[in-house]
Amino acid sequence: DQQVKQNSPSLSVQEGRISILNCDYTNSMFDYFLWYKKYPAEGPTFLISISSIKDKNEDGRFTVFLNKSAKHLSLHIVPSQPGDSAVYFCAASYTGRRALTFGSGTRLQVQP
Amino acid sequence: DAGVIQSPRHEVTEMGQEVTLRCKPISGHDYLFWYRQTMMRGLELLIYFNNNVPIDDSGMPEDRFSAKMPNASFSTLKIQPSEPRDSAVYFCASSPSGLRRTDTQYFGPGTRLTVL
């Protein structure tokens, strides 16, 4: 029973274009969402987060959008760079629980 | 700051053997998490501790798995006996306590376990 789903295992985009990574969740208790980035042979690193009281959060080239009614969030990377090539994990938590529930990840490849 | 330290980085063992994975969290962090990454299930939580006390171990697959945190700077995840299906990358993560939801988790580099 996957509570956080990333239905696209992989995505390929051209350098300079927009990358859009999607994530769906089923647990209505989730009120905090994060994106982590993972390079090979390294642990995941925090990228950006959003609270359920917001519908958008921006940090440089990275923007996360949250649609609570659809239980959907997305990560936009503009413009995409070759160094963004990595696996991106969507994660969620709820108040009172510090552990994260992760999606299965999306491998992004940015072509030069 | 050295970050979260895990050892060994790679472990190859034979089915039936005992395996012990080790983790040193970031100093001052009160939460410690053990995750496992597999192709089939992605990144899943096994157990987490707060101030050395296990809070949620519902993700531990079965009795063959056990985790301890004897002090604030050290934790172990033990598998006894190990099975081929335990082959995965095991991550340890830590985070500070506090009320801020922005207290994110910091991951170690992982231990790649192969059980033959």
Image: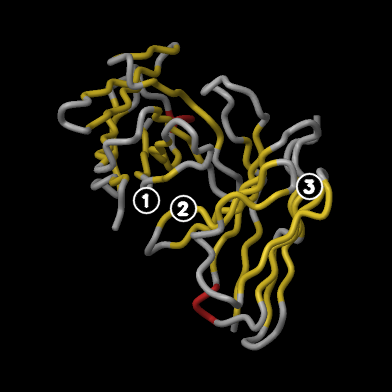
Q: Residue at x 54, y 73 (%)?
A: B86
Q: Percent x, y for residue A15?
A: 34, 25
10 Å crowding of disc 3: few (<14), some (14-19), many (20+): many
Q: Percent x, y for residue B46?
A: 54, 58
Q: Are marks 3 and 2 on the same chain?
A: yes
What amino acid is found at the position of numbered circle 3 in the picture?
Answer: Lys
> Is residue B34 shown left or right of residue A66?
right
10 Å crowding of disc 1: few (<14), some (14-19), many (20+): many
Q: Element under label 3?
A: strand
Q: Nearer the viewer, residue A67 or A89?
A: A67
Could you tell me how far apart the alpha carbons at marks 3 and 2 are, in whole angstroms? 20 Å
**Would you name the residue on which mark 1 appears?**
A104
**Would you name the residue on which mark 3 appears?**
B24
Q: Nearer the viewer, residue A53 or A84?
A: A53
Could you tell me how far apart the alpha carbons at marks 1 and 3 are, in whole angstroms? 26 Å
Q: Chain of mark 1?
A: A
Q: Chain of mark 2?
A: B
Q: Residue at x 53, y 42 (%)?
A: A39
Q: Element under label 1?
A: loop
Q: Are marks 1 and 2 on the same chain?
A: no
Tag 1 and tag 3, C-beta contact below 8 Å? no
What amino acid is found at the position of numbered circle 2 in the picture?
Answer: Leu
Q: Residue at x 30, y 53 (%)?
A: A2
- Direction left: furthest residue: A70
> Is residue B6 shown left or right of residue A21?
right
Q: Quadrant of the N terminus of chain A?
A: bottom left
Q: Percent x, y for residue A72?
A: 22, 32
Q: Chain of mark 3?
A: B
